[in-house]
Image (spheres, rainbow, N blue to C red):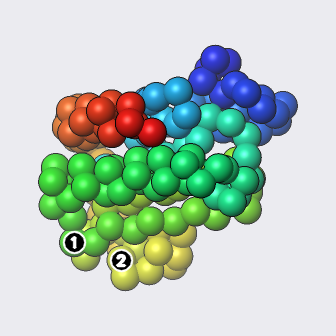
Amino acid sequence: MTDDAKPGNVEGCDLCTSAGGELLWRDDKCRVVLVADPDYAGFCRVIWHAHVKEMTDLSEADQQRCFRVVLSVERAMRDELKPHKINLASFGNMTPHLHWHVIARDIEDAHFPESVWGVRQRTPPSVAAETRRLVGERLTNSLSKLRSLSAGC
Ligand SMILES: [Zn+2]
């Protein structure tokens, strides 16, 4: 994934050197990927292409653009997956390359009401490959609306 990561390709950074998941949508500034987490069908990341550490490293216009994509993923998940809750998170403690996690949560999922990084509460069946494929397809269709959103930035 060389072209997507430029500029600011930093050796050793996972998000500069790989897509970070299954690509669902991209434009010239950022991408949306689906993470293959065995516990979660609706686990996406919005990844800024350039290697920047914090939201405030972006111009104001790019901050708005990034957040608009995050909110569009949230909207797509609500429309397509009807989750109990959406979790938004941006840490970057392990990988200091700007990215947001957008996670569809269910009251019976592996960690609810903890965060997905918290204490496991139960062990639901793993997400089937076919389920993940269908979720990816539905989110991709919903996210196709983003092309017009980002064009105006
Ligand atoms: Zn990076």
- Whether residue 153 is visible to the viewer of this picture, yes or no, is yes
- Whether residue 37 is visible to the viewer of this picture, yes or no, is no
As drawn, 128 above or below 107? above
Q: Where does the image place residue 146, in percent across and percent down from the top left? A: 31, 37
Mark 2: give few (<14), some (14-19) or many (20+) Cα within 10 Å. some
Q: In the drawing, does residue 138 fall left or right of residue 51?
A: left
Q: Where does the image place residue 28, in percent across and percent down from the top left? A: 53, 27
In percent of the image, x 36 and y 77: which residue is there?
112
Q: Where does the image place residue 31, in percent across and percent down from the top left? A: 49, 35
Mark 1: give few (<14), some (14-19) or many (20+) Cα within 10 Å. few
User: Residue 67 has which mark?
Assistant: none
Q: In the drawing, does residue 93 fall left or right of residue 64?
A: right
Alpha-carbon distance for marks 1 and 2? 10 Å
In percent of the image, x 44 and y 80: which residue is there?
114
On the rendered image, what quadrant is the C terminus found in? top left
In percent of the image, x 67 and y 18: which residue is there?
2
**Contact between labelled residues 2 and 1, with CB atoms less than 8 Å apart:** yes
In percent of the image, x 60 and y 24: which residue is there?
4
> For disc 1, does the CB lie below 8 Å from ligand 1?
no
Q: Earlier in the sequence, mark 1 or mark 2?
A: 1
Residue at mark 2: 112
Residue at mark 1: 84
- What amino acid type should be assigned to the residue bearing mark 2? Phe
- What amino acid type should be assigned to the residue bearing mark 1? His
Where disc 2 sits, the SS reads: loop
On the rendered image, what quadrant is the N terminus found in? top right
